[in-house]
Image (cartoon, rainbow, N blue to C red):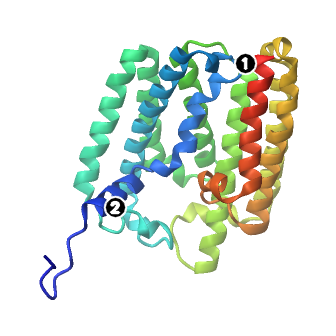
Amino acid sequence: MSAPVGEPAAPSRWTSVAHWGSALRLRQWPKGAVVLVGLLPTGQFLHPGPVLIACAAAVLFHMAAASGYLVNDILDVRRDQLHPRKRQRAIASGAISRSSAGVAAALLGGSGIVLAHIISPALAVLLGAYLAIALGYSLVFKHVVALDILVIALVFVMRAVAGVIAIEADISTLFLASVGFLALLLALGKRLSEAELLSTTNQVHRVVLRSYQAVAWRRVLVAIALATIACYALAATRSPTAATHPLLAITVAPVALGIWRYVWLVTRRGDGGEPERLLGRDRWMLCAAVGWVGMMAIAITR
């Protein structure tokens, strides 16, 4: 039955599901894959038990992350309504009420910590720390230039550590440092793209983004890219894992390709605002990711 004339039609069930999927950032699954990174250099991907545990940890971490996203969107609803893209978000557009989002955030965060305790008490503590940092980011950290991207890099490293804790593996600190540098690169690229977008629309979203319009930040982006490649090259050639699996050196090539492609997309096209979507849109980024996974698997199994 159609809605009466003059009254908006009620959203369909699938529309509501789509709104919640967007609010929970389900399309940002590549971030969850960071939890699984520890499976490759440790060789644990060859055993179904650790794989299942790592996948469970990835799901639980995304539950905690989704809780943080909802809280961030609730606190940032007014600013998001001024953003040319973020105003389409479910909470900013009014598709999901702030009260419903608040209840969902509490349920996701709380249940994530409880379930994580079943896998490992240390994992539950890590998720709790993540939620505390996420709240601090929404309230304070994201409004401070440079500190915002450092916090983003920190929580990415926490994702990788969560996977290592879950499978009780021993991974080189150089690999974790590489994850940190990569996260810093992606965070800065995202900020530069957001700053460029807002400079062309003459709209104010967050004052801190104006600081990222300086040309010097592009040089910082290149420097971080070089540091990421150098750190990963050391991990692939000088870490204890590399001593056991010398073929790890070949994985440096796809890492370098993916990083420089990302830098090019950010500096030439301003296309770094949503890094997780680049894997599906850009064939070079996709080739680099698939190539890294394939080469890593070959290097570890040889």
Residue holding disc 2 = 91
Give the Cα distance between marks 1 and 2.
41 Å
Q: Residue at x 73, y 55 (%)?
A: 283
Horizontally, residue 216 falls left or right of residue 42, namely right
Compared to residue 199, the image places residue 168 above or below, namely above
Q: Position of residue 185 (x, y in %)?
A: 71, 47
How many numbered tags mark residues here?
A: 2
Image quadrant occupied by the C terminus: top right
Between 255 and 14, the one nearer to me in the picture: 14
Horizontally, residue 138 falls left or right of residue 262, namely left
Between 93 and 41, the one nearer to me in the picture: 41
Residue 5, quarter of the rendered image: bottom left
For the question of whether residue 262 can be seen, the reply is: no
Residue holding disc 1 = 172
Q: Position of residue 257 (x, y in %)?
A: 83, 47
Q: Outermost residue, bottom direction? A: 5
| Residue contact at pointers 1 and 2, CB within 8 angstroms | no
Q: Secondary structure at mark 1?
A: loop
Between 263 and 218, the one nearer to me in the picture: 263
For the question of whether residue 168 can be seen, the reply is: yes
Q: Position of residue 189 (x, y in %)?
A: 69, 55
Q: Amino acid at mark 2?
A: Ile
Q: Secondary structure at mark 2?
A: loop
Give whichever of discs 1 and 2 has the lower sequence position. Answer: 2
Compared to residue 197, the image places residue 112 above or below, namely above
